[in-house]
Amino acid sequence: MKKTVLALSVCMSLFSILYAADGELNKAIDTQAGQLEKKIIEWRRHLHANPELSNREFKTAEMIAAHLKQLGLEVKTGVAHTGVVGLLRGGKPGPVVALRADMDALPVTERTPVPFASKVRAEYNGQEVGVMHACGHDTHVAILMGVAELMSGLRAELPGSIKFIFQPAEEGAPAGERGGARLMVEEGVLENPKVDAIFGLHIMSKLPAGHIAYRPGGFLAASDVFTITVKGKQTHGSTPWQGVDPIVTAAQIITGLQTIISRQTELTQDAAVITVGKIQGGVRSNIIPEEVELVGTIRTLQTAMQDKIHEKIRLTATKIAESAGAEAEVVIRKGYPVTHNDPDLTGRMLPTLQAVAGADNVHLIPAITGAEDFSFYQKKVPGVFFFLGGMPPDMSPEQAAPHHTPDFYIDESGLVLGVRALARMAVDYMTATGR
């Protein structure tokens, strides 16, 4: 009995020591994150004024690599073209946690009135375009640079290692190229040392600064691209009966595709979307062309639903074309998988998110039909991806500009919360797993 009591006493004492150590480490994270705020905002504004398109993030990568090397991290560059990976080995044994930020900007011409607005222009798929961080990846990079600086100063106390992944081409590689998270995984970013868990965030322009949103399980949708080529018979516009009109047929196919969602998909299970984003055909007003091309996106949150919708798209397009005497060729290319937050890991990390933001500021939300290639990491290791608020407190979501638009705007007051959240998730995971 005495031995049992002694053993329990030793265990309780050890737990108290570990708990106290955790508390001091988290306290240091919260304090030092606040001290880094000015620097994080400066980094973000520099990146915002100097955006680079997917697989072209050369200057961004140089900036990140120089910062990580200065902090004494083991740095690898040129991963998946322009990616940068930094490894921070903690002073104590433990698991390996990966933290990820995406680096690329979009072919959008900025319209915001901020003094650091982008004036950059570049070539995108053969066209000259404006370039803008219209999805907030500049904030992601600045936040993760801040986490790296903060954690490097605490490395002696870290019960494990942190791998900082700065990823290119989340928005998709240019035509004819490969890139993004899929290529980083193929090139071994989750190995040597092997990653045990991965965490990431995304700024949200319609979520108030200081708030966090999350969801276990399917969080963001799978994203697939379809191309439908409608082939008819060319004729003069004044005599349509002498040909087969692929434009009218394409219009009927577009309408038919929408009934797949509204009438053939069980939307009470999960959301799904089919959108035609491009239609191209014809050269002048009085010629019915031979061919029309439709290009669009498919968003689903379940694999079974994804497969069924793919089948229905092929059936709908080919049969409508056949009824008009035309032909339809359907090509569907799978893109990003569902961003799936490991339910157990999400449950373990929820108290951490509530601790850094306040329980009232952490929200469980429905799944989103946007997509994220963070999903490729989650197919290999357990991961949690969450949203960080970037909307000014005095603004309503209806007023806030959406992502991928010229007026996209972020309130920088929420960036420090992102630093604290990622840093404490890493520490709390390492500590709990190590025990």
Image (tube, helix red, strand yellow):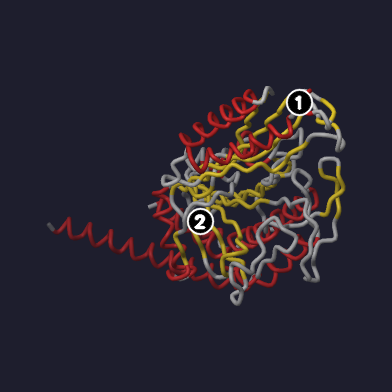
The residue lying at 21 percent from left, 60 percent from top is 6
Residue 293 found in image quarter = top right
Name the mark nearer the viewer: 2 or 1: 1
Mark 1: which amino acid? Trp
- The residue singled out by tag 1 in the image is 241
The residue lying at 56 percent from left, 53 percent from top is 200
For residue 56, side relative to residue 151 (left or right): right
For residue 366, side relative to residue 318 (left or right): left
The residue lying at 51 percent from left, 31 percent from top is 307
Looking at the image, residue 244 lies above or below residue 409: above
Expressed as whole percent of the image width and height from the top left, the position of residue 133 reads 73, 57
Residue 179 found in image quarter = top right
The residue lying at 82 percent from left, 40 percent from top is 125
Q: What element carries label 1?
A: helix
Expressed as whole percent of the image width and height from the top left, the position of residue 362 reads 46, 65
Expressed as whole percent of the image width and height from the top left, the position of residue 351 reads 41, 62
- The residue singled out by tag 2 in the image is 426
- Count residues near mark 1 (Cα–Cα under 10 Å), then give few for <14, some for 14-19, many for 20+: few
